[in-house]
Structure formats: structure tokens, C-alpha cells
């Protein structure tokens, strides 16, 4: 399960209902097993993976189209991605990219 979530970069369209059905268990059982094995909730891991992927994409290419990153993560609207990123990082993806560019200019 851990590898599945990481492989999809925390994509918001990855539905746990589909995974649990495919594995022949309930979502609750899947969640309990995940917490027992990894000491964090699937939701927490899912969001962390999504944020790490977004940070990596922006750090690697600060001029990346943010809608492209948002779409890779399953967001239909860039504004949804922006809200998620700001909630987790305390700054927008655009501000994060500016900081990356600023650091690259200093180096």
C-alpha cells in the first residue's frame, strides 16, 4: 500500500475505496493495517507524498507550469493545488518557486 501511494505521488484521484475493494477488505481495515505498519495514517502519508512530489518538481524546475504539477497530482484546478500547498507549506507554490529561484541566483 505504501508503495502504491508513493507510486502515484499522492494523486488526489487515487481512491481508497477502489484499493480496498481490490484487496478484498474494508477501508477501515486498510487504514488500521497501514497505521500498524507505518505509524501514520494513509491520509497523512498521502498528503506528505503529494507535497514532496510538488516540492521536487518545483525545485527541479522553478519555471514549471504549476497547472502541470497540479494535474499530475490529480487536481482539476490549479486553485485547489494552491490551497493544498499553502495549507501545508505556509506559502503558495509560486512563492515557493520564487524562493527556489532566489536561492539558485545566490549559489
Image (cartoon, grey):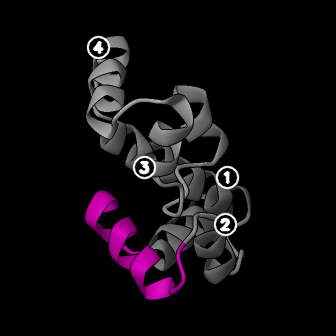
Residue drawn at the location 62% of the way across and 82% of the way down: 67
Residue closer to the observer: 34 or 39: 34
Residue drawn at the location 51% of the way across and 87% of the way down: 77
- Give the residue at mark 1: 107
Q: Which residues are magenta?
A: 75-92
Label total for image? 4
- Give the residue at mark 2: 72
Query: Comparing marks 2 and 4, which lies closer to the viewer?
Result: 4
Residue drawn at the location 55% of the way across and 57% of the way down: 11
Of label 4 and label 3, which has the lower sequence position?
Answer: 3
28 to the left or right of 93: left
Q: Is residue 2 above or below residue 101?
A: above
**58 within the magenta span:** no
Callout 4–callout 1 Cβ contact below 8 Å: no
- Give the residue at mark 3: 17
Q: Which mark is residue 36?
A: 4
Of label 4 and label 1, which has the lower sequence position?
Answer: 4
- The answer to whether residue 88 is seen in the rendering is yes
Badge 1 element: loop
Of label 1 and label 2, which has the lower sequence position?
Answer: 2
Amino acid at each position: 500500500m505504501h508503495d502504491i501511494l508513493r507510486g502515484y505521488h499522492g494523486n488526489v484521484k487515487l481512491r481508497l475505496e477502489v484499493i480496498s475493494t481490490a484487496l478484498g477488505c474494508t477501508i477501515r481495515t486498510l487504514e488500521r493495517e497501514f497505521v500498524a505498519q507505518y505509524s501514520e495514517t494513509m491520509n497523512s502519508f498521502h498528503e506528505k507524498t503529494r507535497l514532496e512530489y510538488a516540492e521536487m518538481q518545483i525545485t527541479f524546475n522553478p519555471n514549471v507550469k504549476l497547472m502541470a504539477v497540479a494535474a499530475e497530482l490529480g487536481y482539476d484546478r490549479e486553485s485547489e493545488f494552491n490551497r493544498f500547498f499553502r495549507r501545508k507549506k505556509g506559502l503558495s507554490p509560486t512563492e515557493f518557486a520564487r524562493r527556489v529561484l532566489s536561492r539558485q541566483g545566490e549559489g
